[in-house]
Image: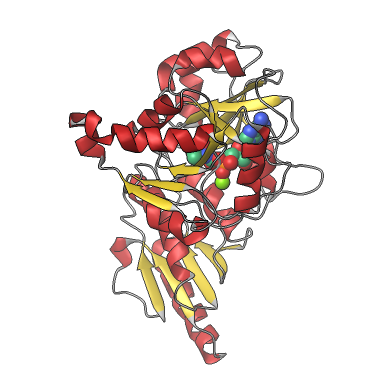
Amino acid sequence: METKILRINRDALALHKEEYEAAFSEAADLIHQGGLVAFPTETVYGLGADATNPFASEKIYRAKGRPSDNPLIVHIYDKSQLQEYAAEVPPLAHRLAERFWPGPLTLIFKKSDKIPLQTSGGLDTVGIRMPDDPVALAFLRACGRGIAAPSANTSGRPSPTLAAHVIEDMQGKIDMILDGGDVFFGIESTIVDLTGEKPQILRPGAVTEEMLREVDAEITTDPALLREPVQECRPKAPGMKYRHYAPKAKLCLLRGENEKVLACMQEKVQRAREAGKRVGLILTDENRGKLQADEIRYIGSAASDEQIAHNLFAVLREFDHCAVDLIYSESFEQGKLAAAIMNRLLKAAAYHIADV
Ligand code: TXA
Ligand code: MG
């Protein structure tokens, strides 16, 4: 299959919508025919299909190599579409949507009959979100219906934050990629389940627990997220139980006071190289030039959790292109995105973390 790539300039889109009308209507036609179109959102790139078409949803699972019990998020462009896809909309949903939509927040509802089980991974619930990205919204509006979209990566790989990452994983497997450039946040949306007795965060993201609790103090985080998943304590979002985001090389995190982390890292690099291994490091800008290794990637300033979140997946992907056997990374515990960053990084590291 040939994958068509259409470049959409976000800034030009705001000024000259009509220039892009043909592109969006071509993308929408593909969706209406049951095809797959990748598109940018403010979090990561999504792999879109008609959420109401079971055959289209099945294609997503095939293209990603995704386990069929892992449900897809439905993307909408207008809050009024909520009633169509959710069977029950509790008052808290309206308050959260009012405050955080469009934005990086997915809400889980009981699903309506319009959502086939192929889209919901066999569950009777559905995740819905309204993204805050002009390209995503224009695409969704052209489609005129809910679009099921997981992150547009091969299952298990880091989520794509650039069209180049989508091309890497999906070229030849999907109909079209809308290339809207770089995404804003770089980590996926926060997920809040509204179907249980109490609202619960199933995946941390840029809408933090603290922000959510300003709307409802009862919102808490799924305790299974705070530790390595084990049989007795499994995360409620099916996708959170799978190995994820992992680079091909083994990743280990070091946590502690900066000077100690650096000293420990240098020692570990030395030992690994003596054993004939090629070693990579993930460091903050402030530690530039302080260590030596085969490959070093700087992820952003230690003072900016936004930069670190934004660059995280691209850095993990880069290591897949440079033949290292082992990667050591600093831990990132500062700022409001720290929980979301460490959630991804710990999964990428298969929970290998050492306190120094
Ligand atoms: O930011 C995002 O959410 C991106 C962009 C493209 O919107 N999408 C995304 O989708 O991250 P995906 O499929 O890569 O991750 C969705 C996560 C999975 O862990 C899945 O198990 C969980 O959401 N999920 C989806 N529907 C659910 C449901 N009904 N109940 C529980 N968890 C659900
Ligand atoms: Mg994903």
Which of the colour schemes (rainbow, by chain, secondary structure, one colour) is used? secondary structure
Q: Nearer the viewer, residue 245 or 202?
A: 245
Q: In the rendered image of this protein, does residue 80 appear above or below residue 6?
A: above
The part of the image, by quadrant, that contains residue 260 is bottom left
> Is residue 119 something that shows in the picture?
no
Question: How many discs appear?
Answer: 0
> Is residue 113 something that shows in the picture?
yes
Q: Position of residue 345 (x, y in %)?
A: 53, 55
Q: Residue furthest left?
A: 15
Q: Quadrant of ligand 1?
A: top right
Q: In the rendered image of this protein, does residue 175 appear above or below residue 54?
A: below
Q: Residue at x 32, y 57 (%)?
A: 300
Q: Residue furthest top?
A: 91
Q: Nearer the viewer, residue 13 or 334?
A: 13
Q: Residue at x 39, y 52 (%)?
A: 163
Q: Residue at x 52, y 50 (%)?
A: 174
Q: Nearer the viewer, residue 348 or 331?
A: 348
> Is residue 204 rendered to the left or right of residue 241?
left
Q: Position of residue 67 (x, y in %)?
A: 71, 48
Q: Nearer the viewer, residue 157 or 65?
A: 65
Q: Position of residue 160 (x, y in %)?
A: 45, 52
Q: Residue at x 49, y 83 (%)?
A: 278
> Is residue 17 rendered to the left or right of residue 353?
left
> Is residue 41 rendered to the left or right of residue 277?
left
Q: Position of residue 333 (x, y in %)?
A: 45, 49
